[in-house]
Image (cartoon, coloured by chain):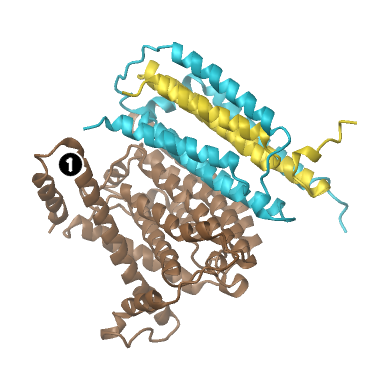
Chain colours: A yellow, B brown, C cyan
Amino acid sequence: MITLNHYVALSALLFCIGLLGALGKRNAIAILMGIELMLNAVNINLVAFNRFLQPSQVVGQVFALFIILVAAAEVAVGLALVINIYRRRLDTNIEDLNWLKW
Amino acid sequence: MEHIFTDLAALVAGWVSGSPQWVQTLVMGCLYLIGVLTFIFLNCIFLIYLERKVSAYIQQRLGPNRVGPRGILQPVADALKLLGKEDIIPEKADHWVFRLAPIIILVPAIMVFAVIPFGKNMIPVDLNIGVFYFLAVASTTTLAILMGGWSSNNKYALLGSMRAVAQIVSYEVPLAFSILGVVMIAGSLKTSQIVAAQENYWFILLQPLGFLIYFIAATAEVNRAPFDLVEGEQEIIAGPFIEYTGMRFALFYLAEYANLVAVSCLGVTLFLGGWHGPWLPSWLWFLIKVYILIFVFMWTRWTFPRIRIDHFLDFNWKVLLPLALVNILLTGIGLKLYQYITLGVW
Amino acid sequence: MPDSQAVFFWLLAALVIGSALAVVLLKNIVHSALYLFLTFVGVAGLYILLHAEFLAAVQLLIYAGAIAVLIVFAVMLVRRGDIRLSNLYSIHFLPALVVSLVLFALVAVAVGRQLWLGYLAPPPEEPLVSLARNFLGEYVIAFEVAAILLLSAIVGAVLIVRGRRRSAP
């Protein structure tokens, strides 16, 4: 029997993997991928809570759709920024982006 | 004749009716899969022959005429030739991705047929998101082409796959919008209900602009001339498929024809009344309409020259997309007016 | 006869977690992106298990395009050097690992202690209709704001990429 706890645990694990990717990678595009994983983990959570606690309604799905939409906007702007940085530095390595440091 | 396929399905369902539920589901699923696969492969074999004959007649040639009567066995000879070719994998290629790409491209090509109503009561799965499922699954084709193009480690292949991404992702937008007009009139995403709504008049009469946009966008989605920039033999040789040989190349070829059949089936379902028609069995009507649409696709392919990539993308964003939006607006206004005239309420 | 729901859940969970790990741990950015798509397919499968078919289709439609674009950019921007070493760990990898593990441990403990009184009633008869009613009824303002957000994201992305316009020759 699969309960809500299974889904929440799965989503927590996925979120932590995404966090690892977002914090521990060097390439800016890989960091975007990590963020996408985290957003998807949140979506699993929303849909699972919807299904188990409010099965007659679809509010969780509505919120999940909004998150997918915001994620799409985020990828578009994020990639545009990465391209602009690449034009100046010929590099997408996050560790080299320390212009504001000193 | 009308019930020949539904009776066959009922016969098999009768055989397994004593077994547990999951066995029944499995057996019927396999049966539908076999049916769809047979449909795809028979059509692809015939289309290889038909394309060559149609192109020959348009160019005032004879076309294949040596193997079998009127060259009808030419596809068999082609398949044997491809089977006998050496299977080459480039040394610097990304081996696993290279091997996977031709298999993965077939998956969406087969999966989309699940929601096509081939005739009366002849729909494999009647999903409540029907048309949307078709679009969603079909959109994954891009990735398979990109996998093939990138893993070949060839500049022409990479160029071709980048074109594929630009072309397919941007033409998905007018394709979806052109379908939206039909969905608004039918009031459902279910393919069965869309066909049922066309019992008296086909949607091509109500949505002529929608059909035109669908036709152009679908041609671009399946990479057929005049929009075959992905392959563009004269510019980038064969695009993503340049390094593929033998059976792997044949799989790409097969997927291409399966996609052509799929968009034609969807076009018939959405705009040409699906399986509705007098006298003949419903599945035969469906097949006839699909072949008429396929013939028009071939006709355009062999009549128009290829378009340049920048013109092509400009055309999408500056002409096709605004037209599709106008079509949706007009459909909405028309629906409201119809409601007002017939029911007297806004 | 095993519980089919459980079988599918465990298969999909293994797929999602396995390919998500591959996204983070592989050193080739194109392979990472392809595994990212596999993760999303698994998540779409989970949505179907949870009776959210529309969401599963949206997931496939949007992320197939998004991933393809990601791969293209990744390939374009890693011209120099070897693509096989295009996705390395940063100097913060070990601290990030510790943070992630600690966070997961905390959530796991919390989830283990909590027992939700969930019940599996049948899903709504017409899920699409109720989705539409929510979007164009209760959440219509959020819906419109989301449209404006998307528009401004597109305009912003185009502006950023185009950069400062040079004077015409």
What chain letter is assigned to the residue under label 1? B
Query: The C terminus of chain C appears in which quarter of the rendering?
Result: bottom right
**Can you say whether A101 is above or below C167 in the image?**
above
Query: At 38% across and 79% down in the image, what residue appears?
Result: B81
Q: Nearer the viewer, residue B119 or A67?
A: A67
Position of B44 compared to B105: left or right? left
- Residue B237 visible from this viewpoint: yes
- The residue carrying mark 1 is B24
Residue furthest to the right in view is A102
Kind of residue sitting beneath label 1: Gln
- Residue B337 visible from this viewpoint: no
Query: At 37% across and 72% down in the image, what residue appears?
Result: B48
Query: At 42% across and 49% down in the image, what residue appears?
Result: B207
Q: Position of residue C147 (x, y in %)?
A: 59, 32
What is the count of numbered marks? 1
Q: Position of residue B312 (x, y in %)?
A: 60, 60
Mark 1: give few (<14), some (14-19) or many (20+) Cα within 10 Å: some
Q: Nearer the viewer, residue B53 or C12?
A: C12
Query: The N terminus of chain C appears in which quarter of the rendering?
Result: top left
